[in-house]
Amino acid sequence: MALRTAMPSAAPGTSKLKAYAKLGKLAFFDFYLCVLVVWTAVPGTELWAAGTWITLLLFLLGQVGVVAATVAFDDLTGVRDGSDARNYTTESEALRDLSRKPLLSGALTVQEAHRFAWAMALWGALLWTATAAFAPHRPLWGCVLLLYVALTSVQYSYGLKLSYRGGQELLLVSSASLVIVLPYALITGATTGLIVLEAVLFGLWSVLVSLYSNMNDIEGDRLAGRRNLATMTRPAAYRGVITVLTVAEPVAVVVAVAVGAVPWWFLAVTLPLFALRTVQLRTGVVRRKALAARVLGIKCQRLGVLLLMAGNVLVVHVAG
């Protein structure tokens, strides 16, 4: 049976609005950088078209709701099974901010967090419905996959609890990849080799943050009954998985160059990212500093977004 912790009492004087923002991880903006990548990849005059801007804005607002619901439900489950109390300690506070867990601090009650999570899920569903309704194009497959992302994301640690049943890494990769593909398809009605490559990269970036978090949280997750790669594999095999996924990043770019999806010089554009990724691999896999590697993963994602935006401008709007 999973260990449970006592529910914290509400902290007097704490700003509820700030606490809700922390519960929804609104400061962790990396989730939403996908719209910048997509926008710079939109071709020709569509880049500045009203339909493009409206679609991206509605998609972004809906994504805020879906992500906020997902992380709020995750915090609810983490408090109830005790895993958050074990994984977020004063020893790790320098690399993992305890204030981001308002349920642990007592800034919010379980009931308040529960209402917030459902409200954000409803907000996300309504805004993504509006996105599909107002988008210049509405391919059936795109609408189906939009529904898939919304439904599976909010059940990451709640409802079906997919991250507790071996689906954590697959869900992270697929959801992060699709938030690149879907808005582009809704704007242009199609996909390109460039977008597929960038979707793969965005998915890898997401999981290469989570894998290091899970490396640090392995004992707490095992006690809570969470089944992910970290808890289901031996440490050496898990480090091997991280290495393979790290190598998959430059390999994806090389394959894209080989099939003509992007020009050869696109590989040069992404070289700074691969250099930083090597530092992350050495920090997390060789030196076993999981939380420091997690921080580097976040930096890799932010650098990668800037590099992809630059690459998109060159490929689509200059060379194209």
Image (spheres, rainbow, N blue to C red):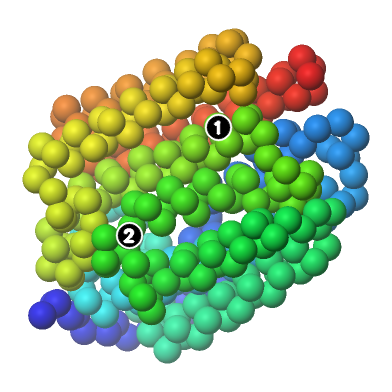
Q: Residue at x 68, y 66 (%)?
A: 128
| 3D distance between C-alphas at marks 2 and 1 | 23 Å
Crowdedness near tag 2: few (<14), some (14–19) or many (≥20) residues, C-alpha within 10 Å: some
Q: Position of residue 129 (x, y in %)?
A: 71, 70
Q: Residue at x 27, y 84 (%)?
A: 7
Q: Which quarter of the image is occupied by the N terminus? A: bottom left
Q: Quadrant of residue 234?
A: top left
Is the residue 224 above or below the residue 313 in the image? below
Is the residue 198 above or below the residue 33 in the image? above
Could one spot residue 12 in this view of the protein?
Answer: no
Quickly name the residue at label 1: 197
Secondary structure at badge 1 equals helix
| Nearer-N-terminus badge (2/1) | 2
Q: Position of residue 10 (x, y in %)?
A: 38, 84
Is the residue 64 above or below the residue 288 in the image? below
Q: Which amino acid, mark 1?
A: Leu
Secondary structure at badge 2 equals loop
Q: Residue at x 33, y 58 (%)?
A: 168
Residue 108 is left or right of residue 217, and the answer is right
Could one spot residue 312 in this view of the protein?
Answer: yes
Quickly name the residue at label 2: 167
